[in-house]
Amino acid sequence: MKLKNIAGIFLIGMFAFSCKAQKKAIVSTETASQKSILFPKGEKITNANFTGTAYLQMLIAADSLNTTSVGNVNFEPGARTKWHLHPGGQILLSTDGVGYYQEKGQPKKILRKGDVIKCPPNIQHWLGASIDPYFVKVAITNTKNGAPVWLEAVTNEIYRSLNK
Amino acid sequence: MKLKNIAGIFLIGMFAFSCKAQKKAIVSTETASQKSILFPKGEKITNANFTGTAYLQMLIAADSLNTTSVGNVNFEPGARTKWHLHPGGQILLSTDGVGYYQEKGQPKKILRKGDVIKCPPNIQHWLGASIDPYFVKVAITNTKNGAPVWLEAVTNEIYRSLNK
């Protein structure tokens, strides 16, 4: 009977301990998830320059003294820009997920967290998320020569062929 | 006796379960830590423009078509730049830790992950890590008007007074 009581106390203790350990595991996961968000997701992009769902959080606007603008773009799986070009060039910093970047006539590049791209002025290209998962990048745009020039959409057929 | 056996089986089961939960907690923490590194730490900065220990990983070099350069700077606790200015301006993206940024004659700003700063051209300023912890930021520099102008060091006395 005494042994049963001791076993009972052990059991209650182990339940308490295991619950605490489980809680710790969940807390760690939540923290990791929160920490992976570097910048806010921003507002849904509603213009016709994107296919699928993407979000933009502007971080820094260009001005007359420093013509560089910085924005955070969050592409949901399958979302991508139309073909386009930047008259002043653009720099991309991949911060999360998996993305694609392709210049006209070149094979696509796969972008992962920490990858950087220098897109020269007036080079036609598109970029976006892989089919799965999403893709997040910081876009650093030199606006000195004017706004981007938007071209045709990347069709589902072209996009799918790039995923083979 | 039968009840004791059942209690014993429960005990073994709970030990196994609690160990598994603990292991999960540790794995989550390790993953979070690994994920927090966005860009490589880079090379130790050996020039006289910094006080304390800092590391630079150049990400994008400026060129004649796009005069924007991008670098990742990792400041160990207490490390900071000298006072300096950028003739073309600079944009800072805080990606980890806690940092300070101060323009001449202004109170210092505390920078945390996700904070962004636009430092106008020719404004004297310094930046660096807090006393604890470290600080990591992406520096986006418009080099169109030339290299930074480096000025006097931020003395220990000034730095300490800023931490009060």
Image: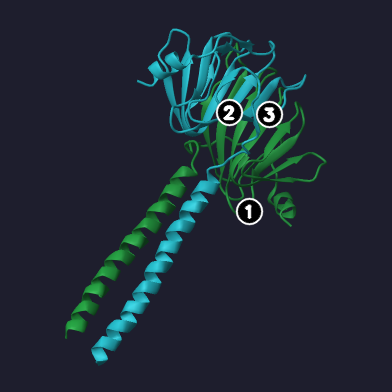
Chain colours: A green, B cyan
Residue under the image location 45 percent in, 57 percent down: B26
Distance from label 1 to label 3 (Cα)? 24 Å
Residue A88, percent from left and from top: 71, 22
Kindly identify which numbered label has been placed on residue B150. none
Dot 1 or dot 3, earlier in sequence: 3
- The answer for which chain carries disc 1 is A
Q: Name the residue carrying label 2.
A: B54
Q: Secondary structure at mark 1?
A: loop
Kindly identify which numbered label has been placed on residue A90. 3
Residue under the image location 48 percent in, 30 percent down: B77
Residue type for callout 1: Ile
Residue type for callout 2: Ala
Judge the density around disc 1: few (<14), some (14-19), many (≥20) Cα neighbours within 10 Å: some
Residue type for callout 3: Gln
Outermost residue to the right? A105
Residue A81 visible to an observer of this rendering: yes
Judge the density around disc 2: few (<14), some (14-19), many (≥20) Cα neighbours within 10 Å: many
Quadrant of the image occupied by residue B12: bottom left
Closest to the observer, A65 or A148: A65
Quadrant of the image occupied by residue A71: top right
- The answer for which chain carries disc 2 is B
- Quadrant occupied by the N terminus of chain A: bottom left
